[in-house]
Amino acid sequence: MPMRSCASDNVKLAESSKLQLNNRKDLIESIAKGFVGFAAAATALASICFDSPAFAESLTVAFPASRAPELQQTMVEIFPLKSADAAYGKISGMLSTLGDPFTRIISPKEYQSFRIGSDGNLQGVGLFISVEPRTGHLVVLSCVEDSPAARAGIHEGDELIEINGERLDGIDSEAAALKLRGRAGTSVTVKVHSGKDVGRESGIREVNIPRGYIKLSPISRTIIPHRTPDGHLTKTGYVKLSAFSQTAAADMANTIHELESEGAHSYILDLRNNPGGLVKAGLDVAQIWLDGDETLVNAVDREGHTLPINMVDGHAITHDPLVVLVNEGSASASEILAGALHDNGRAILVGHKTFGKGKIQSVTELHDGSALFVTVAKYLSPALHDIDHVGITPDVQCTTDMLSSPKESLLKNKSSVSSLEADSCIMVAEHELDVQESRGTAS
């Protein structure tokens, strides 16, 4: 019985019920064929009730429902003890001895909440959350723009302490997501600890957030008029990618074609606060900017075998200078894309160090509808830089100290880009684009 898709970064190996990460051919062919699903992994797109693709931040290898007799026998032996909840608790206790917070079992209700519909309707408050691996706390990766959570003043880095008066100690992201989701028109009360006031009681506040319908458009874009140091007026194409949905690559390609037709001479790709999504989408987006057979990402199994995932005869839409913006909320597929573009010499990274999530998991659906998630490997950047628990450090920090003069006022479309005008990361990105173009001219 093949399992349905659920939310996370993943590559679906539909042909096999056994993990074969040490089989390079099977892994690479499965990715190349595009067998893509979603799986609830280390990050939940919490507080959004999905009837369409949800997003999380682990690369996941998904399986059809398990028929492994030893696993089913274990379930049979455990379930008669008390109840299903008792069985899940027992299994969770066994899995906790592995020392990996992301290896876990989730109940049928939790697993069902991440399965995918197709109508694109979302209901919730609009938070991306994750368990911070070093502390075990639930933290906000980002808020959906103009969502109820954003309007309520929830920010990336905030720690969730309570939901509707219930403490979240030891609760994983999936369970917290269930508590936050709900019908539009209802509300949920959360207690948060500001990420800027860690350790201070004054940083704790309680917020009532109404749930609503949320539209997730993965891409927004504009043209930023830019005057170069020699006084020449050019156009910079600004593209913000908020998540890696099923349409992200196609939308990105269409956007770049449009910006090219509008005369863009350089690009800023904004991945800030993008918590991830489909790894396949991240790899496809990378190929929009790259040529040839470059390595996009490396998978490393438990025996230390490195399995490179390469492009096949790639043809970039544009070769114009590119800067990629990242920050602490850029996770998983965002880190894969940023690493692919950076390590292959295609882009300069500007901003702050990324979140640092690079897990590869197997996902096994059991007969009762629950699911078992087991971390089996991790991924590295093309240059073999570790991402998990480390993140990617940008080439240039997001500061304007190195700029010798104030940024020129934007000359047109001011209403659409005014929020970007004061963004120091945009200013630094434009400076780096000037540097790239001057080097290109000199060569």
Image (tube, rainbow, N blue to C red):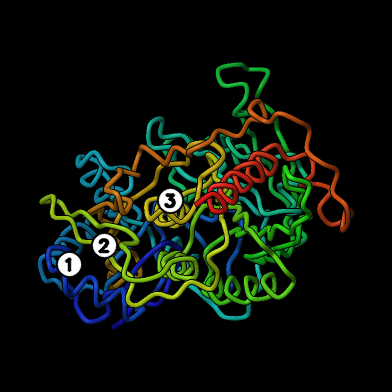
Residue 109 placement: quadrant: bottom left
Q: Position of residue 121 (x, y in %)?
A: 66, 73
Secondary structure category for the residue under label 2: strand
Which circle, 2 or 3, is nearer the viewer? 3
What amino acid is labelled 3 in the image? His
Circle 3 Cα neighbour tier, 10 Å, few/some/many (<14 / 14–19 / ≥20): many
Q: Which residue is mark 2?
A: 362
Question: Which residue, as the protein is rendered here, is positioned at the far front?
Answer: 442
Left or right of 59, for residue 96 = left
Q: Which residue is mark 1?
A: 19
Q: Earlier in the sequence, mark 2 or mark 1?
A: 1
What amino acid is labelled 2 in the image? Ser
Secondary structure category for the residue under label 3: helix
Q: Can you see residue 276?
A: yes
Cα separation between marks 2 and 3: 28 Å
Q: Position of residue 88 (x, y in %)?
A: 31, 54
What amino acid is labelled 1 in the image? Leu
Determine which of the numbered discs, if any, sits on residue 277 in the image. none
Whether tag 2 and tag 1 are in contact, CB under 8 A, the answer is yes
Residue 260 placement: quadrant: bottom right
Determine which of the numbered discs, if any, sits on residue 342 in the image. 3
